Amino acid sequence: MRNQNSIFTTLGASNHALEEREQHDYYATDPKAVELLLELEQFAPVIWEPACGEGHISKVLQAHGYEVISTDLIYRGFGDPEPLDFLTETLEGFEGDIITNPPYSMGLEFVQKALESVRPGGKVAMFLKVQFLEGQKRGLFFKSTPPPNSLYFPFPAGLL
């Protein structure tokens, strides 16, 4: 007899997981994903990485000459040691772009806050699962804030 978890895992239709999720939805971004993004897009000289974790995204951006403001709710040995809650706090006078891999459980909130935090014409790049494009709440969000004409999906399956 098959158990419920194996069905959900096979279909990919649920958040059911066989193992425990990382605390605070912390999953590091493969630096190669950032390299691929930078091959496709240019950003402002200053970038805010508000969920910097251990610096996987920030380090690649710095290596490409960007000035990176690295903050996080939890200090993991990289970036500003003072915790910053991206969803409730802001950087006064910030005029750069935002690139991050938000906690998936707060993806929509991160996208909304990022769009509010960049200057007009500023860029926001989020590393999210493709399932982010689904769901009722996000569907309502996309009706009022449609995604750009071209979404980037250049990553080999092994990186996602």
Image (spheres, grey):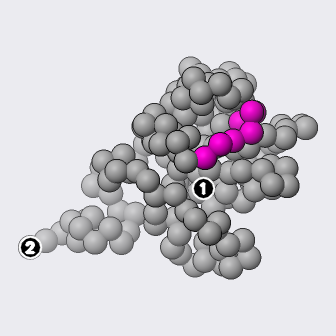
Q: Which residue is mark 1?
A: 106
Say what amino acid the circle numbered 2 marks: Met
Residue 44 among those drawn in magenta:
yes
- Residue 116 placement (x, y as % from top left): 80, 55
Q: Secondary structure at mark 2?
A: loop
Q: Amino acid at mark 1?
A: Met
Q: Which mark is residue 32?
A: none
Q: Residue at x 63, y 61 (%)?
A: 108
Q: Are the two marked residues, 2 and 1, in contact with CB atoms closer than 8 angstroms?
A: no
Considering the whole magenta stretch, tell me its main secondary structure.
loop
> First in sequence: mark 2 or mark 1?
2
User: Could you give the CA–CA distance between mark 2 and mark 1, rounded to whole angstroms?
Assistant: 35 Å
- Say if the magenta span includes residue 159: no
Name the residue at the right extreme.
93
Q: Residue furthest left?
A: 1
Mark 2 burial class by Cα count in 10 Å: few <14, some 14-19, many 20+: few
Residue 34 drawn above or below residue 121: above
Q: Residues within 10 Å of mark 1 (few under 14, many from 20)?
A: few
Q: Is residue 86 above or below residue 139?
A: above
Q: Which residue is mark 2?
A: 1
- The image shows residue 3 at horizontal and vertical percentages of 18, 69
Image height check: is 79 above or below 123? above
Specify start and end residues of the magenta stretch as a single range.
41-47
Residue nearest the viewer, comparing 73 with 115: 115
User: In the figure, residue 105 lies in which quadrant?
Assistant: bottom right
Identify the residue at horizontal 65%, vertical 42% (top origin). Answer: 42
User: Which of the image's four quarters has the N terminus?
Assistant: bottom left
